[in-house]
Amino acid sequence: MIGKGAYLKQLTASTQQMRSVEVGKEMEGSSPPSVFIGSWNYPNVYAGPMIAPQHGDTAIMDLPESWIAGNHTQEEIIGYRLNLVRGKSMVNAGDLGSRYVEKLQEISLSSSSIESEVAFSSIPTGTTFSEEHTPFGPSAGIERFEIESARYDHKLEKVFYDTDLRSAEAVISLHQQAVPFSSIQKAFSVGTMGVERNRHLVPTRWSITACDTMIGDRLLNDVKKNPVIDTFRICQFSSLHNNYAVILMPTSWQYEWSEAFLKVLGNEELVFSDHEGYKKKSGYSHLGGCYYSCKMAVLEALSRQQEQAGAIILREAHRGYVPMGVFNVRENVRSAMQQPAQEFEDIRSALQSLSETFTLPMTRFIEEGALLRESIRQRQCRLSDFSSAVN
């Protein structure tokens, strides 16, 4: 069977015909604020601002936390992103002393949009879509780059000037103070956190997973101290051509993320799954950053509710789905966890209920999901029970 990585390459390739904003070699506009650090050729990376060719408040273009909760359409979100022009210049990840990198840090620490001027080495072209990070519009090398004075977010500014505070503690502290995840991640990526001698640029894709993991690890420590729930629960949410279901089980912490892609490109029905037990997973998940974004979102809710549970999350992506980054998973699972939960006596009745709202037969998730399959086995259910009652 095709792996998820190879499948997503096919899927993102199909988005390249989408048109982005057209600009010339010189541009004035507003950064939401937004920066992007590439991962190719690390530690020498392409880093730079992302700017919209319009003035004023452009914050909505790089605030994923507001898109799902605000019921924005997929077309609106893609429109925001493809209107962002990426400037880039090759820098060493450890070189934080250059004025160019300092400007990127100022952007990331800013509490509001920043007026900017940029001259490119060529006319920006192309679009970029990814399952890991949000899309953006055309890009080109930077020859000249100026920004207005930034007014810093005081919470981000505090950790910036605390050069003895470890980066993990900075990230966790900002999350506890309700700073948006996207703001934390951007500031982390441009080296504004951590012990001074250890600070460096972190590619955007890596920084997203790093922040999800640091926050998730701390939340998990708290959740493991909480009492275990006493019944099966399901929380559901749907948006942007995706269905999500969070199954909470009356067990100590364990976690499984299963995602199905149903006829997005053609007639394919692909299911990918990964899991961990009470102990943290060793190694990086073959499902990529969404594994950690989903986990963080579930733990966030369990911590808030002061409960512990096993969690199995099912996702269906349908025709029309476009890869737009792991925010899609994080924010949809966050929204699911805020919905009223349905309660069930056992796993069988929970899956029977899900079969009424999901397209894919539950047997397919059972076949691919090791924890789901084990949960059924422990409760002495047979797979044939689900073939007749849950399909």
Image: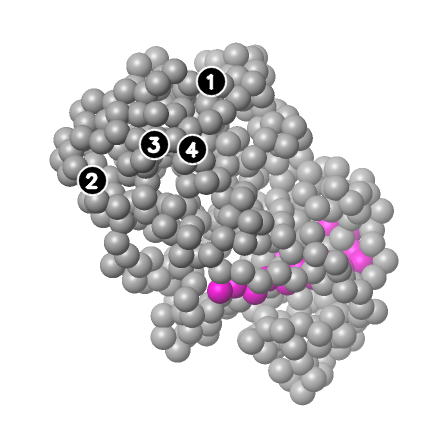
* Mark 4 lies on residue: 57
* Mark 1 lies on residue: 151
* Mark 3 lies on residue: 55
* Mark 2 lies on residue: 23
Helix, strand or loop for disc 1: loop
Q: Residues under labels 4 and 1: Cα distance?
A: 14 Å
Q: Nearer the viewer, mark 3 or mark 2?
A: 3
**Between discs 1 and 3, the one toward the N terminus:** 3
**Between discs 1 and 2, the one toward the N terminus:** 2
**Is residue 190 in sight in this rendering?**
no
- Residue positioned 26% across, 25% down in the render: 117
Q: What residue type is labelled 2?
A: Val
The N terminus sits in image quarter: bottom left
**Between discs 3 and 2, the one toward the N terminus:** 2
Helix, strand or loop for disc 2: loop
Q: Residues under labels 1 and 3: Cα distance?
A: 17 Å
**Between discs 4 and 1, the one toward the N terminus:** 4
